[in-house]
Image: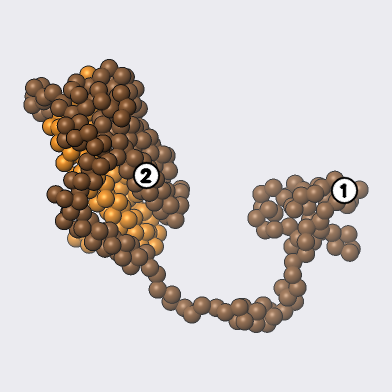
Amino acid sequence: MSANNYLYLSAVLFTIGAVGVLVRRNAIVVFMCIELMLNAVNLTLVTFSRINGQLDGQIIAFFVMVVAAAEVVIGLAIIMSIFRARRSASVDDANLLKY
Amino acid sequence: MTALHVLAAAGDPPTHEAVVFWILAPIAVLAALGMILVRSAVHAAVLLAVVMLSLAAFYTAEAAPFLAVVQVVVYTGAVLMLFVFVLMLVGVDSTDSLVETLRGQRVAAAVVGLGFAVLLVVALAGTLDSFHPKGVAAAEGGKGNVVAIAEKLFSSYVFAFEATSALLITAGLGAMVLAHRERLTPRRTQKERMEERFARGGAAVAPLPGPGVYADHDAVDTPALLPDGGIAVDSVPEHLQISSARPHVEGVERELER
């Protein structure tokens, strides 16, 4: 087995996450799919760090985790305040800006 | 340093890494697929935890033990806990509706996803053939993964690291502002609530009767008996009356009739 298999796995996981964002209607599950995509990219970064023999990939993966944590905090707070206003966590119900 | 670590750092991945990969990769892919297929959001969160834990195992196999630990602590620990916490606030029963808002959107999304996956895999297969992993052992310089990462983080990446702290503070503040709710009415004091209760008068002034306990029942849902032999309905907590207490109350009523 070569290390390239990790890259294929991460491509598959990223695609599944992207399809989930397109398909699911619950805002929280859409968020989980975004997390899945971020995780897949992290796997790519770690694998490339190993292929190239540099540690920078691992450090960037670490920064991605930090940014993902911040993003989750803000995103879930937004979902909560939308839920308070509209009593629904569905992405279809937040349509006030729709033409 | 484990044997796995040394071998993984030296060149081509060892065979036991292949075993780990071929066991965990199908689990991760199936869990990810399940995540977008199950209706319940809580089940999706559990499946996401499976994916994240298998990714942590992959990081360990790829000689990145620091990231593996951070993955478990930050993702499976903090982020998923936050997800489940918000799910409980928003309502666990908030399952997805099966009605398609845009007609044919799911099929289109599946087709786009399949096309994207094929594109990625073909592009990877076309470019990656010549790569042989060098391993990070040389970059670590015998100091170990954590020390090497720390040295890089606090030298080349120190400005990015400082920017991260600003980002985290902003995120914390933002979450507090977004989750904050203004109190629209003044808080009712205990004095006001007492005055309301006594203004209503009657039976509401006295405390509720305690539950009845007899020789054959010692449960809280056993109703107390009134002096005239009837049942004090107030003695059974409201939510117990609805579910389990009804048979009990009826049983006591039957015994009274005998």
Looking at the rendered structure, which numbered label has been put on residue B215? Answer: 1
Residues beneath discs 2 and 1 located on the same chain: yes
The reply to whether callout 2 and callout 1 are in contact (CB within 8 Å) is: no
Residue hosting label 2: B73
Q: Chain of mark 2?
A: B
Q: Position of residue A70 (x, y in %)?
A: 28, 55
**Distance between the alpha carbons at the discs numbered 2 and 1:** 53 Å
Going 41% across and 48% down the picture, which residue do you hit?
Answer: B81
Compared to residue A72, the image places residue B136 above or below, namely: above
In percent of width and height, residue A30 lies at: 30, 46
State the image quarter where residue A23 is shown.
top left
Per the image, label 2 sits on a secondary structure element best described as helix
Which residue is located at x 89 percent, y 64 percent?
B227
Residue A59: image quadrant is top left
Near mark 2 (Cα within 10 A), the count class, few <14, some 14-19 or many ≥20, is few
User: Looking at the picture, does residue B41 appear above or below residue B230?
Assistant: above
Question: For residue B241, which numbered disc appears in the image?
Answer: none
Residue A40 appears in the picture as rendered: no
Where residue A94 appears, x then y in whole percent? 29, 58
Q: Colour of chain B?
A: brown
Whether B129 is drawn above or below B72: the answer is above
Which of marks 1 and 2 precedes in the sequence?
Answer: 2
Residue nearest the observer in this picture, B145 or B97: B145
The subunit carrying tag 1 is B
Measuring 37% from the left and 59% from the top, which residue is drawn there? A80
Task: State the orange chain.
Answer: A
Determine if residue B166 is in view. yes
Q: Position of residue B99 (x, y in %)?
A: 34, 43
State the image quarter where residue A73 is shown.
bottom left
Residue type highlighted by circle 2: Val
If the image is split into quadrants, where does the N terminus of chain B sit? top left
